[in-house]
Image (cartoon, rainbow, N blue to C red):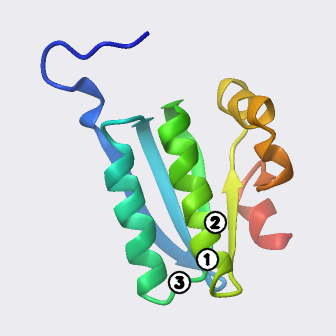
Amino acid sequence: MRVALEEEPSMDLGLDVTEREGWAILAVRGEVDVYTAPRFRERLIELVSQGHHRILVDLEGVDFLDSTGLGVLVGGLKRVRSHDGELALVCTQRRILKVFEITGLTKVFSIHETVDDALAA
């Protein structure tokens, strides 16, 4: 159980976007939880509304991902698919991958070890 008593320490969320080979690459840093997920969701919605329908979410800098964060990713996937797009992930961290495995989302998302691997796929 996680309790935020003082100010929310998990509000430090980095969301940096670059573009490569027709993909918008969203590098996420920090904790993706109930406090930061709304900003993450807004950024994904913004990218799609700007016409980015091929999005690669780089989770290598993520320290923590909860069910709220998974919900944002699933919502983003549905959003890009409604535009015949793709949403892929970069993740090698065991503790984050385990969340995708436990929930069965490894069957839903294309998960790669590096940005280069994802772009080559």
SS label for mark 2: helix
Amino acid bearing label 3: His
**Distance between mark 3 and mark 2 Cα atoms:** 12 Å
Evaluate if marks 1 and 3 touch, with contact meaning CB atoms under 8 Å apart: no
**Distance between mark 1 and mark 3 Cα atoms:** 8 Å
SS label for mark 3: loop
Foreground mark, 1 or 3, reads 1
Tally of numbered tags: 3
Evaluate if marks 2 and 1 touch, with contact meaning CB atoms under 8 Å apart: yes
Pick whichever, 120 or 62, lies toward us.
Answer: 62
Which residue is outermost to the left?
6
Residue 115 at x, y = what percent? 69, 60
Residue at 63% x, 69% y is 78
Dot 2: few (<14), some (14–19), or many (≥20) neighbours within 10 Å?
many
Dot 1: few (<14), some (14–19), or many (≥20) neighbours within 10 Å?
many
Describe residue 93's horizontal placement relative to residue 25 as left or right: right
Q: Which mark is residue 52?
A: 3
Q: Which mark is residue 33?
A: none
Amino acid bearing label 2: Leu
Residue 65 at x, y = what percent? 53, 33
Dot 3: few (<14), some (14–19), or many (≥20) neighbours within 10 Å?
many
Name the residue tied to disc 1: 80
Amino acid bearing label 1: Val
For marks 3 and 2, the one nearer the N-term is 3
Foreground mark, 3 or 2, reads 2
> Above or below — where is 36 with respect to 77?
above
Residue at 24% x, 24% y is 9
